[in-house]
């Protein structure tokens, strides 16, 4: 009898031990086959600043696509509606939930030290994307990936200087208004600085700098106002494409013409992002004279950073993305910024086609 029991017990005991060991090691023996157990997902809390622009929508889409379940992530997404308080609340929630990583797209640069210290105390790495944070101690975040906004601005103002020089328009006759992004955002700070420095250097007439919040509606309202105050505006420097759409609406509603021929009363619009077809179409029609590309596709870049960290490696502290300068008018073929040559990327011009069409009907 005893023999019989042991004959049954030993294999039974053995398989129980096996299942226990197998489960512990992450694979389970079922019917002799080893199937990899569902790998633990990497939990990421992403505090996005808002949904104010086409750039932002593309950025959000890129992040969700990269940090998706099929790629092994569990993403907790919070939209801050362009308010820093909402982003800080989201980060505190991520800390409570003990996420593996926090990703922050900060609406403005300052005011993050306290909450980033809380994340650091909780041992949660923080990755900053897009705009920069201005903190006392840069150890409060692991790394940053985004654009060089001042370089973007320099490309646009150098393009403008080349253009007006080649068209023999005197600097004193360049009357510019700057429709700015959210005040305090890195994109606004860098792009505004580039224009202000160029105005100083080239002697252009900067009539006004007014916040347009990176939105089409606000820029429309602001441009309506500026057209009511100034009758000699001939360049509108928009700090993103959605603002450019609003400015163009206002200019055309006022019965003025948007275009390249500023010597003959047209108003030139320059802009940033180049994210959606509407903006690229405006460039092709020379309604936006040039766009400094601002690349929103940070999803794969953040995914690569997390994979490096998961492998115990350290990513670069700051990673700048390479970006183009877009135009369709071929007067300016390249710009030089801080000794570096940037070729203009030409979009095919539909302007001549429409002009030709107009000529025929005249
Ligand atoms: C730039 C980004 C800016 C875009 C705007 O990286 O922060 O915010 O240029 C967006 O379109 O609203
Ligand atoms: Zn003048």
Image (cartoon, grey):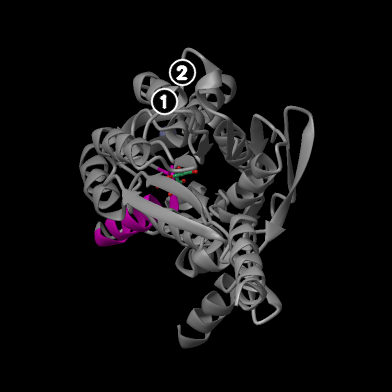
The mark found on residue 135 in the picture is 2
The answer to whether residue 236 is left or right of residue 202 is: left
Task: Tell me where residue 322 sits by quadrant.
Answer: top right
Q: Is mark 1 within 8 Å of ligand 1?
A: no
The answer to whether residue 356 is left or right of residue 322 is: left
- Give the prevailing secondary structure in the magenta stretch: helix
Residue, x 31% and y 38% (percent of image)? 87
Compared to 306, does 357 lie above or below?
below
Asked whether disc 1 touches disc 2, contact meaning CB atoms under 8 Å apart, the reply is: yes
Percent across and percent down for residue 75 are 44, 55
Residue, x 58% and y 79% (percent of image)? 353
Task: Tell me where residue 311 sits by quadrant.
Answer: top right
Mark 1 and mark 2 lie on one chain; the one further toward the N terminus is 1
Disc number lying in front (1 or 2): 1
Task: Tell me where residue 49 sits by quadrant.
Answer: top left
Residue, x 50% and y 22% (percent of image)? 140
Compared to 215, does 110 lie above or below?
above
Over which residues does the magenta segment extend? 234-253
The mark found on residue 352 in the picture is none
Q: Secondary structure at mark 2?
A: loop
Percent across and percent down for residue 206 are 41, 28
Q: Is residue 58 visible?
A: yes
User: Dot 1, crowdedness within 10 Å: few (<14), some or many (≥20)?
Assistant: many
Residue linked to disc 1: 116
Q: Camera-side residue: 107 or 77?
A: 77
Q: Camera-side residue: 301 or 90?
A: 90
Pick out the residue farthest to the top: 136
The answer to whether residue 139 is left or right of residue 91 is: right
Percent across and percent down for residue 175 are 42, 35
Tell me, yes or no, whether the highlighted magenta stretch contains residue 241: yes
Tell me, yes or no, whether the highlighted magenta stretch contains residue 164: no
Q: Camera-side residue: 251 or 59?
A: 59
């Amino acid at each position: 009898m005893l023999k019989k029991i042991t004959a049954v017990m030993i294999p039974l005991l053995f398989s129980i031990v096996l299942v226990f060991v197998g489960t512990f090691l992450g694979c389970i023996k079922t019917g002799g086959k080893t199937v990899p157990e569902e790998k633990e997902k990497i939990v990421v809390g992403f505090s996005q600043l808002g949904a104010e622009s086409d750039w932002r929508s593309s950025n959000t889409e890129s992040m969700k696509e990269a940090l998706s379940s099929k790629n092994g992530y569990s993403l907790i997404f919070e939209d801050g509606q362009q308010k820093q308080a909402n982003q800080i609340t989201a980060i505190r929630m991520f800390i409570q939930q003990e996420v593996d990583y926090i990703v922050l797209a900060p609406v403005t640069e300052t005011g993050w030290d306290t909450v980033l210290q809380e994340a650091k105390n909780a041992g949660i790495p923080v990755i900053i994307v897009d705009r920069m944070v201005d903190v006392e101690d840069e150890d409060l975040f692991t790394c940053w990936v985004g654009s060089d906004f001042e370089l973007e601005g320099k490309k646009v103002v150098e393009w403008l200087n080349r253009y007006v020089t080649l068209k023999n328009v005197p600097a004193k006759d360049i009357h510019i208004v700057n429709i700015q992004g959210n005040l305090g955002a890195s994109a606004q700070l860098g792009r505004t600085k580039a224009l202000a420095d160029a105005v100083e250097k080239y002697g252009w007439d900067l009539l006004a700098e007014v916040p347009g919040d990176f939105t089409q509606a606000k820029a429309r309202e602001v441009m309506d106002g500026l057209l009511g105050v100034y009758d000699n505006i001939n360049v509108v420097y928009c700090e993103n494409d959605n603002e450019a759409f609003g400015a163009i609406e206002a200019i055309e509603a006022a019965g003025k013409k948007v275009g390249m021929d500023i010597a003959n009363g047209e108003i030139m619009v320059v802009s940033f992002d180049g994210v959606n077809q509407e903006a690229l179409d405006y460039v092709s029609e020379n309604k936006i004279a040039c766009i400094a590309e601002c690349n929103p596709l940070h999803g794969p870049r953040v995914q690569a950073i997390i994979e490096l960290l998961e492998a115990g490696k350290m990513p670069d502290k700051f990673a700048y993305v390479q970006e183009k300068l877009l135009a369709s008018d071929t007067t300016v073929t390249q710009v030089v910024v801080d000794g570096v040559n940037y070729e203009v990327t030409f979009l095919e011009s539909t302007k001549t086609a429409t002009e030709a069409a107009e000529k025929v009907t005249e």
